[in-house]
Image (cartoon, rainbow, N blue to C red):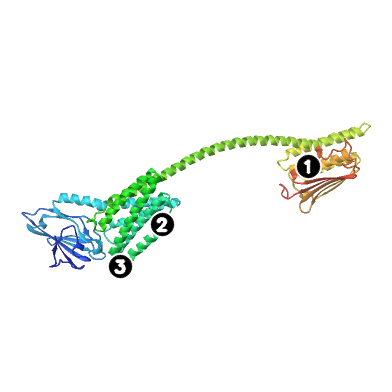
Amino acid sequence: MEAAPSGWLDERPPASGWRPVQVPSNWNAHWPGHDGVVWYRLRWDIAGAPQTLGLYMHYVMSAGAISVNGVELDRDESLVEPLSRAWNRPRFLLLPAPLLHAGRNELLIRVSGYAAYQPALGQVEIGPPGPLRAAQRASELARKDLNWLHLGIGATLGCFFLALWLMRRQEAAYGWYAARQAAWVGFTVNFVNTSTWPLTHTDAYAAATTAAYMLYHGCGAMFVLRFMGRRWPRREVVLWLLICGACAAVLLAPHEHIKAVRHTLAWASSALVVATALVFLHLAWRGGSLAQRLLSAAMAANALATVHDLLVFSAVIYGNFYLASYTAWPTTIGMALTLAWTFVANTRRIERFNDEMHHSVAAARAELKASLARQHALELLHARLGERVNLAHDLHDGLGGMLIGNINTLERTRAPLPPQQVLDMLRTMRDDLRLIIDTASAQHHGELSLADLLAPLRYRMSQLFELHGIEAHWRVSGLDEVQLDATQSLDVLRILQEALTNVFKHSRATRVDVTLVREEGGHLRLEVHDNGVGLESSAAGAPPPPGGTGLRSMQTRAQRLGARLAVDSRGSSTTVALHMPLRGLRGTS
């Protein structure tokens, strides 16, 4: 072939300046630093009648137009800025027989490019259409289709793991993998895009591609660290400061320096890739899982491919074929499968833990159910025993006191009692027994109040005192405003009844004063004062000592009410006083 340089806007090849070249040809070897157009010309002879041929061009860096015998057959959309990016598009053209001449024929190729971006014309083949067409399709598969496939896979996996990371922010490896894929999509578009869109100049497009390449490797390094459960804060800060500085440098570099900047950053990125692969291999094979070891080996192979592509990019290896199209997408899928494997393994561990927890909870629930059943049985037994004890106390304080009183009456009366008096005694005991029964049946319904229960008790005790010649003086005030439940009312009245029973049983008093009032400040005060012999002068067989059954029953009831019970016996009198707070008791207003 022959080649000759010209300006950007030249639509015709120059008349002079042609020199022989061999394709593939990078014009920097002949015209260093030339930006613009180089024309390539091939002349060949056909003996005999022309036949249809095929034209296969491996690549044009960066845009071009093709003519045969003065007829333009192919032309990229833009041969000036914004320059078309046809560098990775293998071309096949059919040269029909009428287009060709017997004898001399001419192929003319106009190539537009920049010295900073390896301007060149790839290998050119003319021959039978079938084999050349097959070769072009195979090359297009490797250069274009595989990159489109990789773009789709990378974008899909990136979106998937981004969604996982958004749902599980603690899984930082997912987030860095999604960021890595986003940067890789930005870089890989360079292999399939045929224009500089959305940018308006080749320099800006190349700078953005280089920045995406830097970010891709930075995110890959972060992914490896997080995937291996490592955090190196200081080194990570230094890494990202360098990456941000490099991106700013390439984006701001003027045209005359962009080649040097891009080559420097390409070497730095490759060094980062190799370092990341070595760190990954070291961490994975020192204490990692099988999946991590396999992935580290895949990344090591990808690092070797990156080194090869760097040598191609730097023109150390001549050509424009990059291994990334073959190695990047298997590595990406391997990373995704490894993350998925890890996710599934974690999910299975969680499921096993949930199953264990379910069985543990079921066993604990069964044990708790049995414990509650036992506790319920014990509480039921305790309630029954409590009811029996309360019934015993009620019988002692009420019916027992009435029986003792009536027995004392019978013993003191020498003459036969009138039938009416005996009948009154029996009716009184009947009424007391009915009080016990009515109160027990009303305990849970609140049917009886303190005022309701006090009236019959007062009536009976007044009659009993009158029979024994004891004056009873009652002072009752404010009870209509006191609302207690049946159990509380019965406890108060039983304390009163026990105190009154002790008066006529043991005190030999002639007067008793009973006070039951609601005081200001929310207290109930009960006092029983008699002018009898007192407790200290009691003889054996008279009043019971302070630790007797009656006083113990009164103390128990007072504690149940949250009240304070005091017994004061001085000289010839005894006072039983009960002070009970009303606030906080259920049913009290």
Q: Tag 1, which secondary structure?
A: helix
The residue that disc 1 covers is: 555
Please identify, in this view, whether the residue under mark 3 or under mark 2 is nearer the observer.
2
Which residue corresponds to the image point at 13% horizontal and 65% vertical from the top-left?
Answer: 18
- How far apart marks 1 and 3 lie (CA) works out to 101 Å
Q: Mark 2 or 1 closer to N-term?
A: 2
Viewer can see residue 116: yes
Indicate left or right for 537 with 214 as reference: right
Q: Amino acid at mark 1?
A: Gln
Q: Tag 3, which secondary structure?
A: loop
* Furthest residue in direction top, as rendered: 416
Q: How far across and down, in percent of the image, does residue 84 sit?
A: 25, 61
Q: Mark 1 or 3 closer to N-term?
A: 3
Q: Amino acid at mark 2?
A: Arg
Indicate left or right for 421 with 130 as reference: right
The residue that disc 2 covers is: 235
Image quadrant where residue 367 sits = top right
Q: Determine crowd level at label 2: few under 14, some 14-19, many 20+ residues with C-alpha closer than 10 A.
A: few
Indicate left or right for 290 with 49 as reference: right
Indicate left or right for 346 with 526 as reference: left
Q: How far across and down, in percent of the image, does residue 562 sit?
A: 74, 46
Please identify, in this view, whether the residue under mark 2 or under mark 1 is nearer the observer.
2
- How far apart marks 3 and 2 lie (CA) works out to 30 Å
The residue that disc 3 covers is: 254
Viewer can see residue 424: no
Which residue corresponds to the image point at 31% horizontal and 53% vertical from the top-left?
Answer: 151
Q: How far across and down, in percent of the image, does residue 495 sit?
A: 80, 42
Please identify, in this view, whether the residue under mark 1 or under mark 3 is nearer the observer.
3
